[in-house]
Image (spheres, grey):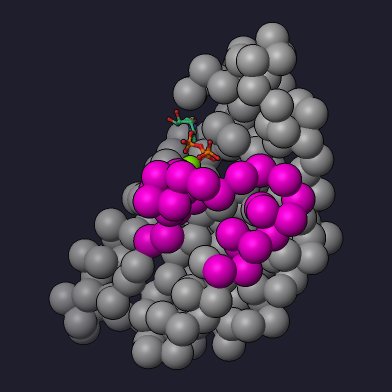
Amino acid sequence: MASEKRFKPTVLWFTGLSGSGKSTISERVFEILKQQGYEVEHLDGDVIRDIFPKTGFSREERTDHIKRVGYLASRLQTHGVFVIGSFISPYQDARDFVRNLCDDFTEIYISTPLEECERRDVKGLYAKARKGEITQFTGIDDPYEVPEDPELTIDTTNKSVEEAVQEVLDFLSSTSK
Ligand SMILES: Nc1ncnc2c1ncn2[C@@H]1O[C@H](COP(=O)(O)OP(=O)(O)OP(=O)(O)O)[C@@H](O)[C@H]1O
Ligand SMILES: [Mg+2]
């Protein structure tokens, strides 16, 4: 219901390794915000790569991909939409590019360490990367630049999804009047 609205719409940008929890947390935050009456859009890396399957994983291709979706996020924000982005987005300069485009940008670093992400191996991709069946896999043979100054950091290793979601909502409360 519209009367429940209390957060200032921002671009909530989830970054972190594959399997760290970006999509899981952001999908739940999306549902909650929608339920509370916000105009909200969730842009997710896998969904967008499915639509544009030629998007590659070189530094240049990853950067172009993030710049494009970041521009889209900033345009939606201009119209008052609460935007949630979940992308590995491994490069600081690409994330900063998006930050600079957006009126309000909240970088959420899902800092779940590699060993936990690999233990989960939700998509079986870490196993493939270790065997050399896929290359340019972030954390294995491709870099991840840890955010220099994120608004929020969440390590999901010993945390429920609900607890992680609550940390995001608490942050939004703390920055809203
Ligand atoms: N506190 C938590 N928050 C989020 N996910 C958690 C948590 N605890 C365990 N998990 C599990 O970790 C996995 C996270 O996978 P998810 O697909 O969300 O990662 P991702 O960061 O979106 O990865 P990718 O970059 O490959 O899309 C899920 O299986 C989820 O159930
Ligand atoms: Mg995901």
Count the marks: 0
Q: Residue at x 72, y 45 (%)?
A: 58
Q: Residue at x 47, y 75 (%)?
A: 72
Along the line of sight, which residue is nearer the eye, 175 or 17? 17
Magenta-drawn stretch, dominant element (helix, strand or loop): helix
Q: Residue at x 65, y 39 (%)?
A: 17
| Residue 41 on image: x %, y % | 35, 67
Residue 28 in view of the camera: yes
Along the line of sight, which residue is nearer the eye, 133 or 107? 133
45 drawn magenta: yes
Quarter of the rendering containing residue 91: bottom right
72 is higher (above) or lower (below) than 167: below
| Residue 83 on image: x %, y % | 43, 71
Quarter of the rendering containing residue 81: bottom left
98 is higher (above) or lower (below) than 170: below
104 is higher (above) or lower (below) than 133: below
Along the line of sight, which residue is nearer the eye, 157 or 95? 95
| Residue 103 on image: x %, y % | 58, 87
Q: Residue at x 69, y 81 (%)?
A: 100
Residue sticking out furthest to the left: 1
1 drawn magenta: no
Residue sticking out furthest to the front: 54
| Residue 134 on image: x %, y % | 64, 22
Q: Look at the image and give the residue range highlighted in magenta.
A: 42-68
Residue 165 in view of the camera: no
